Image: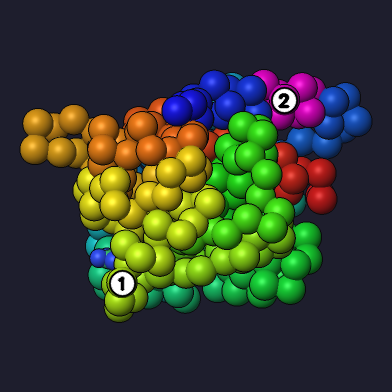
Amino acid sequence: MELIDGKAISAEIKDELKLKVEKLKSEGKEGCLAVIQVGNDPASSIYVKNKKKACEYIGIGSVSYELSENTSEEKLLGVIDDLNKNPDITGILVQLPLPSSICEDNIIKAISPEKDVDGFHPVNVGNLCGGRDCFVSCTPAGVIELLKRSNVDISGKSCVVIGRSNIVGKPMALLMLKENATVTICHSKTPNLKEVASKADILIVAMGKPKFVGAEYVKKGAVVIDVGIHRDENNKMCGDVDFEAVKDIASKITPVPGGVGPMTIAMLMKNCVKAIENK
Ligand code: NAD
């Protein structure tokens, strides 16, 4: 079994982006990511801090808007409208989840598609469906980079994606299709999950269930990508895959932590640089 090292690959990508940003600056092209957080959920605060740190590392600006938990939807829409119109802001990111009083869908739709570095706006999702150039959701885009940079052939392979969320499962399946895999999407209503999953050459698990996928879900020699992030009963990080049970069956596998996780921010930075290039 070979470990797919997301930490090393994400560092490589950020270094490539750093050089690209330097070059763009020399051509007079600069940009800035606006990060909006509503409320002070501790996990969201850590994500926001890490995103700003990554911007600093690759050499692009970032500004953060920390709005109180009881911010109204109108107020948030007003902030987004100002940022959409501000030519110095090249990327806008609203940290999810939002308080239940705000409709996430309205907020996602309000962000200008040209500044939607999360790739959640319906225009970007539609362009992804149509196979056109667009901002792609960062976690699934990160999985594609991991596979390519680990020399996994995708074309013609059978791929099973477990999970159909708008942020991970669905765009993941579309991206694998674009890479010419034969794709099956499984979800909570799929019968015979083990049987379907164990046919996959490439198994991508994004189901949000700690250590759910054991040995019987994995074909000998399959490539296993674990998107899940959890804390187990000992407060140790783990994924949706039971790593110990699967590691000797898979040919390549991502660990948690250090697999898909670090790729999400690297791909966000890639989208931020793309937004500057498109400016
Ligand atoms: P989600 O809860 O929105 O979606 C989970 C999906 O799994 C659903 O489509 C559901 O149908 C499917 N599912 C649930 N139980 C199932 C079962 N028993 N059998 C088959 N399918 C089942 O979650 P999400 O936002 O897609 O995230 C999935 C996991 O990935 C979570 O653990 C999340 O924390 C993690 N995540 C990690 C990153 C990262 O940067 N690494 C980013 C986003 C999400």
What stretch of residues is rendered in magenta? 15-22
Measured in 3D between alpha carbons, the distance from the residue under mark 2 to the one under mark 1, in whole angstroms, is 43 Å
**Where residue 232 sits: x, y (%)?**
15, 38
The numbered dot on residue 137 is none
Camera-nearest label, 2 or 1: 1
Q: Which residue is mark 1?
A: 192
Number of residues whose C-alpha sits closer than 10 Å to that of mark 1, classed few (under 14), some (14–19) or many (20 or more)? few
Q: Which residue is mark 2?
A: 16
Residue 28 is drawn in which quadrant? top right
Residue type, numbered disc 1:
Asn
Tell whether 48 sits left or right of 182. Answer: left
**Where residue 171 sits: x, y (%)?**
56, 63
Residue type, numbered disc 2:
Glu
Residue 111 included in the magenta stretch of the image:
no
**Residue ID at (46%, 59%):** 199
**Where residue 193 sits: x, y (%)?**
32, 67
Instruction: Judge whether 156 appears above or below 165 on screen.
Output: above
